[in-house]
Image: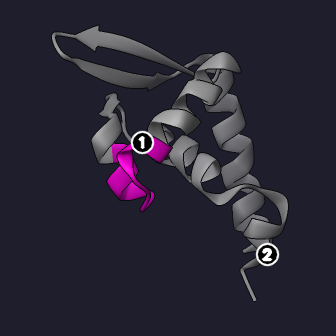
Amino acid sequence: MADNFDLFFRRKPALMLIALKKVSRAKYGSVLAKEVDCTYSHAVKILQTLEELGLVTFEKKGRIKIIKLTKKGREVADSIENIKRVVG
């Protein structure tokens, strides 16, 4: 049986928000995809949805996009992390 966390959240998007929260600097999409164990194209689709929800922003530096949490994204990541800690 999947852990209790999966009962409440879609695993990859939730883990992406937590991963972005855990670092003080922004991340690249490819690094984030590896951290949450998904393909780059899947990560991009999730990140586009998170951007539409106002949880992340993209900052273009040359040819690459850097991903950062917004204030709202940080609050959501905090909440997800608290729930993950409580339910295991």
Ranked by sequence position, the earlier of labels 2 and 1 is 2
Asked whether residue 54 appears in the rendered view, the answer is no
Q: Hey, which residue is sitting farthest front in the picture?
A: 41
Whether 61 is among the magenta residues is: no
Q: Secondary structure at mark 1?
A: helix
Q: Hey, which residue is sitting farthest right in the picture?
A: 8
From the image, state whether disc 2 or disc 1 is nearer to you.
1
Against 80, residue 37 (above or below) is: below
Quarter holding residue 10: bottom right
Q: Which residue is mark 1?
A: 41
Q: Is the image coloured rainbow, by chain, by secondary structure, or in one colour?
A: one colour
Whether 39 is among the magenta residues is: yes
| Residue 49 in the image, given as x and y percentages of width and height | 64, 28
Q: Which residues are magenta?
A: 32-42
Q: Quadrant of the N terminus?
A: bottom right
Q: Residue at x 31, y 29 (%)?
A: 25
Left or right? Give the position of 18 relative to 37: right
Magenta stretch prevailing secondary structure: helix
Name the kind of residue labelled 1 in the image: Ser
Q: What distance separates the C-alpha of mark 2 from that of mark 1?
A: 27 Å
Residues tagged 2 and 1 counted as in contact (Cβ below 8 A) = no
Left or right? Give the position of 74 relative to 42: right
Circle 2 residues within 10 Å: few <14, some 14–19, many ≥20: few
Q: Which mark is residue 4?
A: 2
| Residue 38 in the image, given as x and y percentages of width and height | 44, 57
Name the kind of residue labelled 2 in the image: Asn
Circle 1 residues within 10 Å: few <14, some 14–19, many ≥20: few
